[in-house]
Amino acid sequence: MKKTDNQVLVIFGASGDLTQRKLIPAVFNLYIRGFLPDCYAILGVSRTEFSDDEYRKKVVLENKYLNNTQQISEEQRQSFAKKVFYQSLDSDENQNYDYDILKDRLTKLEADVNSCDNIIFYLSTPPSLYGTIAEGLANAALNHGTSGWRRLIIEKPFGYDLASAKALNKKLLCHFTEDQIYRIDHYLGKETVQNMFVTRFANSIFEPLWNRNYIHRIEITAAESVGVEKRGGYYEGSGAMRDMVQNHLLQLLALVAMEPPVKADAESIRNEKLKVFQSLRPMSAEDIKTNVIRGQYIESTIKGKKSDGYRQEPGVDPASKTETYVAMKFFIDNWRWSDVPFYIRTGKKLPTRVSEVVVHFKPNHHHLFAHDSEISNSQNVLVLRIQPNEGILLKFSMKIPGAGFNTEQVNMDFHYDDLANVYVPEAYERLILDCMQGDATLYARGDSAEAAWEFIDPIIKAWQEDDSIPIFGYPGGTWGPEHADDLIEGKNMVWRYPCSNLTNDGNYCEL
Ligand code: BG6
């Protein structure tokens, strides 16, 4: 087990939803599993007034998101709650907090818990405050320790477009060094996402085939069955492209497409991921029209129940053109992937919640057993399932017993569930622990956040500026606009239509 220094976690945005739902439960799980150092404290910070005890009650003692699946005793909750403190801070009209008060409180906390002057600042605030808080911390000399370290975790979204991401990087780097900055993308904290890296590079059977000579196409899907729920206000300024594609899906792509790094350390891995983003073929205006499909869910009936369209959601403009669905086809211009199409698809109110990477291998050059029309059904397919029913599935052809050489596709699958007694940590749990230990491998580096925006920016601009690019309505509960199937060229070739169960797809779904 790596060493974890004594430390304090300061959470800005402490009264927010993310803190309650994800951050405190993640640290609580680390506590239960014995990963917190002896001297440890959480200091929640926001403008709302709470005493320490009121805050403890809200985020620990009465927090329904705290892990209830393990046998947690009241005593454990109570003793964890004692590690949690709160400081309300006033802010001026420019949204600058009173950092002197914060500094005094941290000095006192340091003396009380003996946290060795090590502090993580977690910015879980509206993104417009990230730069301002970094600056405020620096002005109060909180960006460096006397004897300990300082780290800064920045929640997504990192920027709104290329220009704002660059401006944010610039501002952060005025006050913190790159190795102090941890840009979080919770997809990278998922065990199954990390396992893609291991599947590729720990097994000699996959890597030799992992290139243009053997791979026909790669699909990445992140489908959600829910709509935007209460987040209409945020989503209006975001849309699926900014919310999912620029970060989570491009991060998955980087892991699927990267070259083997020299070492499994943060810099080597992040160097290779950056090269993937730098090799993305920029989309021309024509490519954007033909290879990117955007959609928005419309009113529908799902399983007999009326379901609102996006434009009816609270906080959403009734004439909104914000996309809740994106499907796109693009290429990576490098030696390994030249001419291999990559497909990304994500959307809200799709039939089921599922995220997966699907690698379609090329068919045999000489078709001994299949008729041409069946070739697409006999290609080998490797599915790396991220969620739910986490696992890996390989589809391959076998002979149907009896006369002749009739073949059928069969499945070989591994499910994480089969690993009895293995605890799979929540994404935030893993990521916070990594930051506590100073490991940035699973965090996005500034240059790659910008490189990802460089690819996405022209698409968003084209959508804003060119009214002739349609936004297709799709009924909730369907797989989005049918046009998305046209992106995949080839006889009988369509997206994999997954089910929540890894091994089934298409018509055999129990959603
Ligand atoms: C978040 C997006 O980053 O990821 C949400 O803002 C989305 O809109 C969520 O629902 C999906 O995460 P997960 O882990 O549920 O796939």
Image (tube, rainbow, N blue to C red):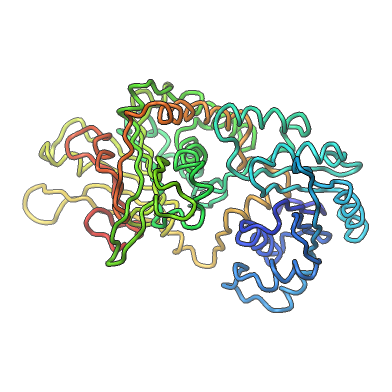
Q: Residue furthest left?
A: 403
x, y percent for residue 93 = 76, 43
Residue 357 visible in the snapshot: no
Q: Who is closer to the viewer here, 359 or 137?
A: 137
How many marks on residues? 0
Q: Residue at x 78, y 33 (%)?
A: 175
- Which quadrant of the structure image shows residue 372? top left
Q: Residue at x 91, y 52 (%)?
A: 104
Q: Is residue 60 left or right of residue 375?
A: right
x, y percent for residue 108 = 92, 56
- Which quadrant of the structure image shows residue 450? top right
Q: Is residue 249 left or right of residue 25?
A: left
Q: Is residue 257 left or right of residue 450?
A: left
Q: Who is closer to the viewer here, 262 or 321?
A: 321
The quarter of the image holding the C terminus is: bottom left
Q: Residue at x 28, y 39 (%)?
A: 484
190 relative to 49, above or below = above
The quarter of the image holding the N terminus is: bottom right
Q: Who is closer to the viewer here, 101 or 32?
A: 101
Q: Residue furthest bottom?
A: 74
Q: Residue at x 81, y 53 (%)?
A: 89
Residue 423 visible in the snapshot: yes
x, y percent for residue 311 = 39, 50
473 relative to 470, above or below = below
Q: Who is closer to the viewer here, 380 or 68?
A: 68
x, y percent for residue 377 = 20, 44
44 relative to 69, above or below = above
